[in-house]
Structure formats: structure tokens, C-alpha cells
Image (cartoon, grey):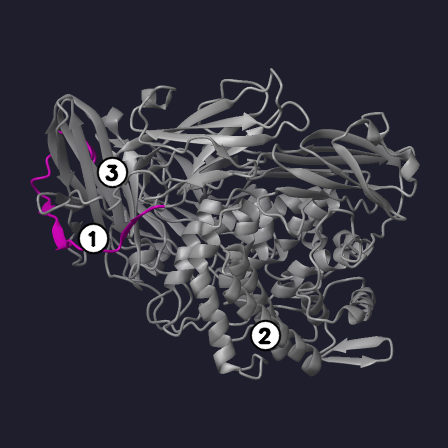
């Protein structure tokens, strides 16, 4: 899980410049897209320097043979001269529902040599229901009669706590049918709740917690599965288990309405389309002919846990021949298909299995298991013969208390307890399917003996292909990066949650927006955030405001706070810059404008003090709080500025001018109201680190006052330790701002700090993920108040991005999108080596450097179609060599500038190796004042 994942498209058939990693709407071979004009994209690879693209051609056809020269494709772009293209939107005849389309991209190289031949690659995508006028959904929503089912025997204490919440058994639904000579079978399925579908006992697909969380009053996702290989000639059974999930289970922490936010019991909607060798299609749809009962799963809840009672098991119920005469007809609730949408992202999957590191007996029949890693997921437990009625209880926790038992106080009302009740069968494997927990430790109660081989932790998270890697000479920073990665994995579960363990797990907007730059370095999150941006849009208020969490919980008032609601502006902009897909902006711009207009309308004096929602300010910042109006007005200026830039990128010039004027007005008011000067000194109201970070990061100060602000920021950090006194909003800005204004040395000092507050303090005490608080636990005070003390919370891990673009030096220029123009500028600090690799939208970008014996060596890879500004850290320009020669030996290497600490080159695509006399300095020079010949700098907005 630590490196880029393979792609399943057909390999190109030529060497040299070649396309690979073909994607449709940022997914590899999506099965069941609902998009009428999908984006067909590709990455590029090459073997030589300057092997760049000149043109592309894309063909789409229903039959692979029509992609060949002389074929009759459905759509053919012809040769398009566009060296910057990352993909093309389909613009052919309307796509038909439930149809597989094959497509091919051909790339022509810019070089005009005999060896420079065009190269191509092929892939496919398949539609689900795209509204093409053909009959679509026929299925009805069905469920089990929701009347209570009596509980057998006296429950244990763990069960009683769960049963007190009114949880019911998971319904089983089945439909028997016959089939003959089926050549193609597609299953389209959704649930109000969660589902798992089996065909003749075999599971359809590998999605977990499907169909995922949305605001079910606005959108309900469905998935598509190819089940052709599961259909038999003769008798078959389509069977499904459904559970409460986010629909009717416990979500969030609102005590007045802790669960059943969208409905009161789970329901299934499914259609199985069977196409025979005669071309005719038969549809098996959910309706009143289905039969329903209950089985071993007596309850399943995301927060409370899951109970399997094998005495209730309906063995064989998912197979032909099962006698369901004692079951009830399914309850048809409605046939409303209006909210159904095809999934746009990959589902949650079981992504890793972690063995037990230690198993410790803590009492008779009780063991505590340490998996060595905090994660989100479940336990897989191999259980020997368990007498009828005997119970095994599995509880979960992130930490241990002083007595070696589970520390569960920070779970609040989440029981996080799974129960297995035996029926005498010789052995079983217990693995819940409709819950997940945040844990490193599990307590197993009810087994006399337990070995490490009997238990495994299964990590669940949304399947976002890993695209980034980082490494350096400091093992502590490598561990920090691993903690950041696991925090991301643990909290990207259908939505970007704040934490995976307690009774919350909500999609907080600010947490996600500060962490997104790091997340997008680690993994390809384009499809994941495409889905979540729709959740954000669904959660908007009637006035056009963004919320604080998405998806929205019905009946919960949620007016976006500064920095939280602003995520609706910040996230689309960053996704556009990262992936080069303008649809992130075109889809979001109306909402971006409505948000900024709402703030302006309620704050005509341009100081954001009204319509601020719960105003979290700089959440969980230790020490003196940053004044709320400072935080809010800075965010107002930033959102107005990004809205203007989004309009510019889309060619909406008048709109851009409108919001640039507004942003300039807010900046002027910020300086007037909150900035004071006294000679060469400057104070931002409140005199907090976050106040200066916001002012500098968002360009709110006149150019002649930035030096004073940087000095004061550095003084505050140095006098604190050096240490940060920032919360969620400030921490993401600290290292980038210090670096931008020439204090990378101070950013490195913060990275190296090991006392509270710091990133390395938790690691010294065994952390394997990022904590919610700087001081979630200390030797002196123990655990902080359990009301808000997660040990798996990614917000403070937003420093991860700077490890890539700062320490390793792999970045793109401020004017670049999709990594068209890289900036390679290592900040070595006291390190002796570092490296970063990133599978960008264009192809592989990579940097590796090391220093020793007075020499600084820098290797880099620039993807085809891109170029790079390379900052070689040396005070001796004459010492620079590239591949052992004077850089001037290659016309693809151009000298741009020399400074006291860097020699700067522009290079074309390809691989390079620079060496130079090591500058040996920790401090960096300011990025912005440096003007490079022929380069682009982002000035003060």
C-alpha cells in the first residue's frame, strides 16, 4: 500500500513516447458510469529527454475492432494538435444505457525522427442508466417487515447495551429464478442502508459499506457488477443482506437524534439483467415476489457494532433449493427512482490485512491483541467449536489504559462491540460485514486460548489508488509520513471523516480542505472528491451557504463557519490545479459565487462578523485564540480571490473582475482594521501565529509590510519553543508560509521538535496515526478530556504536503495546473537525503537528492509534456554539472538565474542528474521576490 497501484488498461504497443494509465472520469475501466460526456484521460511515459506529445486522437466504439484504422468508430476526434492535453470530453453520439464502450488514444510525438512513431493504448468503460430514453429502472424498493423480532435468551452486558438502542436483525432477501445460456449478466443495486448481494452463494463484487453515504433525501448511489460468471443454467438465487448503515443507524453525536436520520429500516433496490445467446434480456427486479427472513446477524450498526448469533443462521439461504416457505413476502415500500445516481468513485474495499503483533492474556478467557497500527476496519477471528449460547465479545480501542485494558472513554456513546454467539458447530470465522471501528487494540472475551494466527485486522477505506511516496534520511520524519498516510486511509471511508472511532465520523469541511493538498499527494483522490463535492453541494443552505459537514443530516441546522464553509471554494480550486480538470470549477463556480455573495450581503462593510455559523475560529489551537473577525475576514478575502481565479480559468472575465474587486476591497479592509504598524514593527490583531499565517498565506498585506509580518511570526514561533500554537486552520499554513518567506530553517525546526506541541511528540509515545490534539496524551496529565480526543484524526497531518514539496522539493509552479510546469526546489535542512515520487495527471514526476563529501546530488524525472524549474542549492554556480558535464551541453537545459544560494535551470521532460558544491545552509531565500527570466511567479493577489 505504499506505492503507486497498477492500472488495468491494455499496455501500449510501442516504446518511446506512449500513453498509459487510461482513465474514464478519473477511474480505471469504470463499470456502470452514468455520465453522458465522460472525460477520457491518459498519462504519458517516455524513454528520452524532450520526448513530448504534439497531438492526440481518440476513438470510441462499441466493438474493439472498430478502433483500428479503417474501422467505423462511434466517435473519432481525428488528429488534434494539443501538446498540453491530459484528456478529452466525449462529444460523440449519445451514449446508450447498459453498454460497454471501447476507446483508444493515439499520441504523436513532437520529435520528427524516424524513431518518433505514434503510439496508442486502449481501454473501456461501461454505462449504467444514462437517461437515453430507453426503459430504465423497473425495480421497487423492498424490505423486511420492520416489526420487532424477539431476542433469544438473556443478553450479555455488551448485547444489552446494543439492544437498548432498538437495533433489529439484518433482513435477508432472496429471489429464485431460472436461466439458460446467459452470455452477459449485470447487477444494478442500491440500498437505503447497506447491502451485500450474493448470486448462488458467491458475492457480487468486493464493495464494503455500499452504496456509500450520501444525503439520501438528495441522492442515492447505485453500483454495477458483472456477474456473468456466477449465473448457472437452471436454478439460481439472487440473495441480499441489508443493514441500517447511515440510513437508519446511528450517525453523529446529536443526543436529540442520534440515529434513524433518513429512515427507520433498511431497504433494497436491485435489477439483474440477463442477456441470452439470442440477444434477448430478462430482468429480475426487486418486487413483491421476493421472500424475506432473518438470519445470524441480529444487529449491525456502524457505531455500535455487530452481533452474529449462529443459532439463528439460515444455512443455505443464498443457494437454490433452500426452503423459504416459512419466510414472508418482501414488503414493497415504493418505486421512487428519482434520486438514483450511478457511483462516480470507487467504493470502500478491504484494502489490507494486518496480523496480530502481540496477544496478551488479561484474565480467564480474555485477551488483548495489539495490531501495531491504528486503523479503520474490523477484526477477522477464527473461532473453534463454540457451544450453543456461548459468547465471544470483541471490543475495540485506540489505546490502553494504565492497567493494560482498553481505553474506551473517547469513544463516547459508540459501543464498538462485536459479538459472536455459538451454536455448537465445529469452527467458524467471525468477521462483521456492516460495521467498522477505529482501533489498534482489540479485546477478545470468551475464548480460553487465542493465538496470533487466529486473528487479523482488516483495514477498510475508499479505494483511492496510491500515487505518492516520500522518504528521507530521518527515520522520525519517515514515521511521521507513515502516520499521515494511515490517518488518510482510516478517514477516507466513503466521505472524508474526522475520525473513525467515536460517535461522530462526520465529513467536516475544514478538516478536509486543510488536508486535501496532502491527500492529493498521497493518492489519486479526484473521483473520491468528485463524489464528495456533490455531497457538499447537496448540503447547501437555502440562502446558498455551504455547511460545516457533508453529507447533511436532516433536521440539523448547519450554517457554514469561516474556514469550514470556505472549503466549498478551496477544494474545487485545488482539485483543478492538481488534476487539470476544469469541470471541478465549472460545476462548483455557481456555488462558490453564492457563498461569497452571501458573506458580502450580510457583511457590507467587508468585515465578516455576521452569518458566521458556530464559528470554530482556529479550532483546537493551544494558547491565545486568534480573534474571530481576523480569521473570518481573512477567509472571506481568500474565497473571493479564489472565486475570481476560478472564473478566470473558465474564461468568465467579467465575473473574474467582479470578484477580484471584492477581494481587493476585503484585503484593504483587513489591513485597515486589523493591522497596526509602529516604525519597522507590525502587529496583526491578536498577535497570534495563526493571524500572521493567514495574512501572509492569503496575500492580505501590502508588499512593504510582509517582511515585518514574517519577522513577527518567526519571533512568536521561536519564543514558543520553537513551536506552533496553531489549530486546524493555522497548522496547514505554517511550513509553506515560513518556506515561502525565507524561513525554511524554522519549518525544519518545527519538524524536528519532539516536545508538546509537535508532530514528533506523539510518535515518541507510540502513535501510528496523527492525533486530534497536540496533547491528546502526556506523561504528566495522561489522557485529555474524552469528549474530543481522537488518536486518528488527519487535520494536523496537513504538514505532509510540505514533506513532498518542501523537504524533497517536488512541486508545481503557482501558475501551473496538472503539473505542466514543475518546480524542483529541495529544502534539505539537516537531512542528508530525501526523495518524493508522484504519479501526476501527466505521468511520473520524481525527485531524489542526497548530500555528502561537500557535494549535493539531485536526480529528477519530468513527465512528457511538462517542464521544470530546477533550483540547485549551491553558492558556486561554476560547480554545477548535469550528467557529469556542463549543463550547457544539452539544449534542453537552460540557465534561468543565479542567487547566493541557488543556481536555477529550466529543463524539458526526461531524467536529469545535477551535482554541485553543497551550499550547506538551512535557510532558504524567499520564493516570491525572486524573478526568473522567462518564468512565472504568483505575485500578491
In the drawing, does residue 872 fall left or right of residue 599?
right
Q: Where does label 2 land, which residue?
A: 632
Give whichever of 220, 882 is nearer the camera. Answer: 882
- What residue is at 61 percent from the left and 78 percent from the top? 628
Q: Are discs 2 and 3 less than 8 Å apart at CB?
A: no
Which SS class for mark 2? Answer: helix
Q: Position of residue 581 (x, y in %)?
A: 49, 47
Q: Earlier in the sequence, mark 1 or mark 3?
A: 3
- Among the 4 quarters of the image, the one containing residue 290: top left
**Separation of marks 1 and 3 at Cα, in angstroms:** 19 Å
Give whichever of 899, 9 is nearer the camera. Answer: 899
Reply yes or no: does residue 113 show up in magenta.
no
Majority SS type along the magenta span: loop
Q: Where does label 1 land, which residue?
A: 337
Q: Position of residue 940 (x, y in %)?
A: 70, 64
Q: Where does label 3 land, which residue?
A: 96
Relative to 164, say whether 443 is above or below: above
Q: Position of residue 136 (x, y in %)?
A: 18, 44
Relative to 140, say whether 56 is above or below: above
Quarter of the image with the C terminus in it: bottom right
**Separation of marks 2 and 1 at Cα, in angstroms:** 41 Å
One can see residue 443 in this view: no
- What residue is at 29 percent from the left and 35 percent from the top? 225
Reply yes or no: does residue 324 show up in magenta.
yes
Per the rendered image, the range of residues in magenta is 315-343
In the drawing, does residue 456 fall left or right of residue 622?
left
Amino acid at each position: 500500500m505504499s506505492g503507486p497501484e497498477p492500472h488495468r488498461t491494455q499496455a501500449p504497443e510501442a516504446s518511446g513516447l506512449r500513453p498509459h494509465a487510461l482513465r474514464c472520469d478519473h477511474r480505471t475501466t469504470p463499470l456502470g458510469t452514468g455520465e453522458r460526456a465522460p472525460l477520457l484521460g491518459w498519462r504519458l511515459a517516455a524513454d528520452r529527454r524532450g520526448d513530448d506529445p504534439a497531438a492526440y486522437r481518440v476513438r470510441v466504439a462499441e466493438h474493439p475492432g472498430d478502433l483500428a484504422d479503417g474501422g467505423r468508430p462511434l466517435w473519432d476526434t481525428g488528429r488534434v494538435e494539443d501538446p498540453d492535453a491530459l484528456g478529452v470530453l466525449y462529444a460523440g453520439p449519445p451514449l446508450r444505457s447498459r453498454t460497454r464502450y471501447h476507446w483508444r488514444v493515439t499520441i504523436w510525438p513532437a520529435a520528427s525522427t524516424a524513431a518518433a512513431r505514434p503510439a496508442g493504448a486502449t481501454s473501456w468503460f461501461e454505462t449504467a442508466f444514462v437517461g437515453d430514453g430507453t426503459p430504465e429502472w423497473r425495480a421497487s424498493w423492498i424490505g423486511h417487515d420492520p416489526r420487532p423480532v424477539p431476542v433469544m435468551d438473556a443478553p450479555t452486558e455488551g448485547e444489552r447495551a446494543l439492544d437498548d438502542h432498538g437495533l433489529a436483525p439484518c433482513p435477508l432477501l432472496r429471489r429464485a429464478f431460472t436461466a439458460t445460456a446467459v452470455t452477459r449478466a449485470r447487477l444494478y443495486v442500491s440500498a437505503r442502508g447497506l447491502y451485500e448481494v450474493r448470486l448462488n452463494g458467491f458475492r457480487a463484487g468486493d464493495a464494503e459499506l455500499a452504496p456509500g453515504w450520501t444525503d439520501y433525501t438528495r441522492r442515492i448511489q447505485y453500483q454495477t457488477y458483472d456477474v456473468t460468471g456466477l449465473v448457472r443454467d437452471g436454478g439460481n438465487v439472487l440473495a441480499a443482506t441489508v443493514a441500517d448503515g447511515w440510513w437508519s443507524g446511528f450517525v453523529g453525536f446529536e443526543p436529540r437524534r442520534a440515529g434513524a436520520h433518513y429512515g427507520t429500516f433498511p431497504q433494497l433496490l436491485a435489477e439483474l439483467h440477463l442477456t441470452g445467446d439470442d440477444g434477448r434480456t430478462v430482468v429480475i427486479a426487486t418486487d413483491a415476489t421476493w421472500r424475506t427472513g432473518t438470519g445470524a446477524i441480529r444487529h449491525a450498526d456502524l457505531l455500535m457494532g455487530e452481533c452474529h448469533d449462529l443459532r439463528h443462521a439460515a444455512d443455505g439461504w443464498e443457494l437454490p433449493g433452500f426452503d423459504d416457505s416459512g419466510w414472508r413476502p418482501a414488503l414493497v415500500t415504493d418505486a421512487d427512482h428519482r434520486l438514483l445516481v450511478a457511483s462516480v468513485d470507487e467504493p470502500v474495499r478491504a484494502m489490507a490485512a494486518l496480523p496480530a503483533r502481540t496477544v496478551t492474556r488479561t484474565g480467564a478467557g480474555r485477551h488483548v491483541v495489539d495490531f501495531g497500527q491504528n486503523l479503520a476496519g474490523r477484526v477477522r477471528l477464527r473461532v473453534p467449536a463454540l457451544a450453543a449460547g456461548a459468547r465471544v465479545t470483541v471490543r475495540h480501542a485506540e489505546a490502553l489504559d494504565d492497567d493494560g485494558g482498553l481505553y474506551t472513554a473517547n469513544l463516547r456513546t459508540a459501543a464498538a462491540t462485536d459479538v459472536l454467539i455459538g451454536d455448537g458447530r465445529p469452527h467458524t470465522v467471525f468477521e462483521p460485514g456492516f460495521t467498522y471501528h477505529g482501533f489498534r487494540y482489540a479485546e477478545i472475551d470468551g475464548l480460553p486460548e487465542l493465538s496470533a494466527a487466529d486473528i487479523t485486522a482488516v483495514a477498510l477505506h475508499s479505494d483511492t489508488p496510491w500515487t505518492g511516496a516520500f522518504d528521507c534520511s530521518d527515520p522520525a520524519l519517515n514515521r511521521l509520513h507513515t502516520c499521515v498516510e494511515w490517518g488518510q486511509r482510516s478517514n477516507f471511508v466513503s466521505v472524508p471523516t474526522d475520525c473513525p472511532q467515536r460517535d461522530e465520523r462526520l465529513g467536516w469541511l475544514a478538516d478536509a480542505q486543510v488536508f486535501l493538498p496532502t491527500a492529493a499527494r498521497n493518492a489519486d483522490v479526484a473521483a473520491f472528491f468528485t463524489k464528495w463535492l456533490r455531497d457538499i453541494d447537496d448540503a447547501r443552505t437555502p440562502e446558498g451557504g455551504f455547511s460545516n459537514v457533508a453529507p447533511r443530516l436532516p433536521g440539523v441546522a448547519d450554517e457554514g463557519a469561516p474556514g469550514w464553509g470556505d472549503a466549498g471554494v478551496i477544494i474545487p480550486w485545488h482539485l483543478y490545479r492538481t488534476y487539470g480538470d476544469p469541470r471541478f470549477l465549472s460545476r462548483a463556480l455557481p456555488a462558490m459565487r453564492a457563498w461569497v455573495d452571501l458573506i458580502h450581503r450580510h457583511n457590507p462593510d467587508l468585515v465578516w462578523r455576521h452569518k458566521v455559523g458556530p464559528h470554530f475560529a482556529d479550532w483546537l489551537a493551544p494558547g491565545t485564540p486568534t480573534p474571530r473577525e481576523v480569521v473570518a475576514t481573512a477567509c472571506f478575502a481568500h474565497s473571493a480571490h479564489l472565486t475570481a481565479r476560478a472564473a478566470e480559468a473558465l474564461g468568465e472575465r467579467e465575473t473574474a473582475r467582479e470578484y477580484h474587486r471584492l477581494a481587493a476591497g476585503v484585503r484593504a479592509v483587513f489591513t485597515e482594521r486589523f493591522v497596526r504598524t509602529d516604525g519597522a514593527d507590525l502587529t496583526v490583531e491578536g498577535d497570534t501565529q495563526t493571524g500572521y499565517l493567514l495574512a501572509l498565506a492569503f496575500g492580505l498585506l501590502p508588499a512593504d509590510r510582509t517582511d515585518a509580518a514574517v519577522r513577527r511570526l518567526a519571533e512568536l514561533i521561536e519564543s514558543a519553543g520553537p513551536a506552533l500554537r496553531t489549530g486546524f486552520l493555522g497548522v496547514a499554513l505554517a511550513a509553506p508560509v515560513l518556506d515561502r518567506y525565507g524561513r525554511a530553517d524554522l519549518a525544519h525546526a518545527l519538524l524536528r521538535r519532539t516536545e508538546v506541541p509537535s508532530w514528533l511528540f506523539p510518535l515518541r509515545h507510540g502513535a501510528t496515526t496523527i492525533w486530534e490534539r497536540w496533547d491528546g496524551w502526556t506523561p504528566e496529565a495522561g489522557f485529555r478530556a474524552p469528549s474530543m480526543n481522537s488518536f486518528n484524526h488527519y487535520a494536523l497531518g496537513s504538514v505532509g504536503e510540505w514533506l513532498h514539496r518542501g523537504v524533497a522539493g517536488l512541486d508545481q509552479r503557482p501558475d501551473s495546473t496538472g503539473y505542466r510546469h514543475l518546480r524542483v526546489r529541495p529544502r534539505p535542512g539537516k537531512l542528508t537525503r530525501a526523495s518524493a515520487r508522484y504519479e501526476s495527471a501527466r505521468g511520473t514526476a520524481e525527485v531524489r537528492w542526497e548530500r555528502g563529501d561537500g557535494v549535493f546530488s539531485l536526480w529528477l524525472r519530468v513527465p512528457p509534456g511538462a517542464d521544470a524549474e530546477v533550483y540547485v542549492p549551491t553558492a558556486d554556480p561554476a560547480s554545477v554539472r548535469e550528467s557529469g558535464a556542463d549543463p550547457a551541453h544539452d539544449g534542453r537545459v537552460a540557465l534561468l538565474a543565479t542567487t547566493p544560494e541557488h543556481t536555477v535551470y529550466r529543463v524539458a521532460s526526461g531524467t536529469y542528474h545535477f551535482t554541485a558544491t553543497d551550499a550547506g545552509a538551512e535557510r532558504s531565500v524567499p520564493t516570491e521576490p525572486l524573478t526568473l527570466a522567462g518564468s512565472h511567479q504568483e505575485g500578491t493577489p
